[in-house]
Image (cartoon, rainbow, N blue to C red):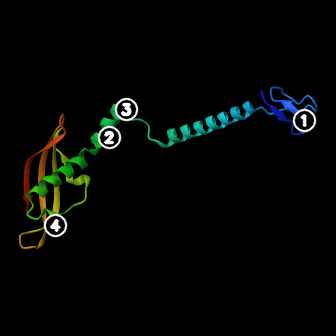
Amino acid sequence: MAVVKCPDCGRDVSDSLKACPHCGRKIEKSTDLITATISIGMFIGIILFVWVSLFSSPPETPAENARKQERDKPTEAFSMAQVMIEDLLKAPSTADFAPFDYDSVQRINLTTWKVKTYVDAENSFGAKLRTWVEVTLEEDAPSQRWKCLDIRKLE
Ligand SMILES: [Zn+2]
């Protein structure tokens, strides 16, 4: 209980009363202020929650995840083929690989892929040459490790 001044008549009023006993003015209790603050806080919280729900991607189901991985497989095979080609180059630091292209990746079977791509790299004389390479590679699904089955230069 606290004694507050009535904002209308200026007389002392206990804040436990709902209204000023002198003039009938409604007394705003400090608890009302706390309630209002909590309400605003909850309101902002709900807005934030809705905002986050709307703009964050929904959690992926295992099926969606598998489908996404499947879609990324050609890209993965392609970049693994580039790593395998790079191992064979005399000057790997000079290598400029072809950009990814779905046409350059061919699926042989469930785990085997054939990548036909080119690389521009310097030869031992320092001349930049384009070499077309075909890489056959296989993914070991459980370990997700790629193995080179065949790598050959195309004339
Ligand atoms: Zn009053």
Tell me the crowding category of disc 3: few under 14, some 14 to 19, or many 20 or more residues within 10 angstroms, Cα based. few
Report if the CB atoms under discs 2 and 4 are less than 8 Å apart. Answer: no
Determine which of the numbered discs, if any, sits on residue 61 in the image. 3
**In the picture provided, is 148 more to the left or to the right than 70?**
left
Ligand 1 has an atom within 8 Å of the beta carbon of the residue at disc 1: yes
Mark toward the start of the polypeptide (1 vs 3): 1
Ligand 1 has an atom within 8 Å of the beta carbon of the residue at disc 4: no
Return the residue nearer the eye: 81 or 108: 81
In the image, what residue type sits under mark 3? Thr
Q: Is residue 8 above or below residue 88?
A: above
In the image, what residue type sits under mark 2? Lys
Mark toward the start of the polypeptide (3 vs 2): 3
- Residue at numbered disc 1: 11
Report if the CB atoms under discs 1 and 2 are less than 8 Å apart. Answer: no
Determine which of the numbered discs, if any, sits on residue 94 in the image. 4
At a point 33% along the width and 32% down the height, the residue shown is 63
At a point 59% along the width and 39% down the height, the residue shown is 47
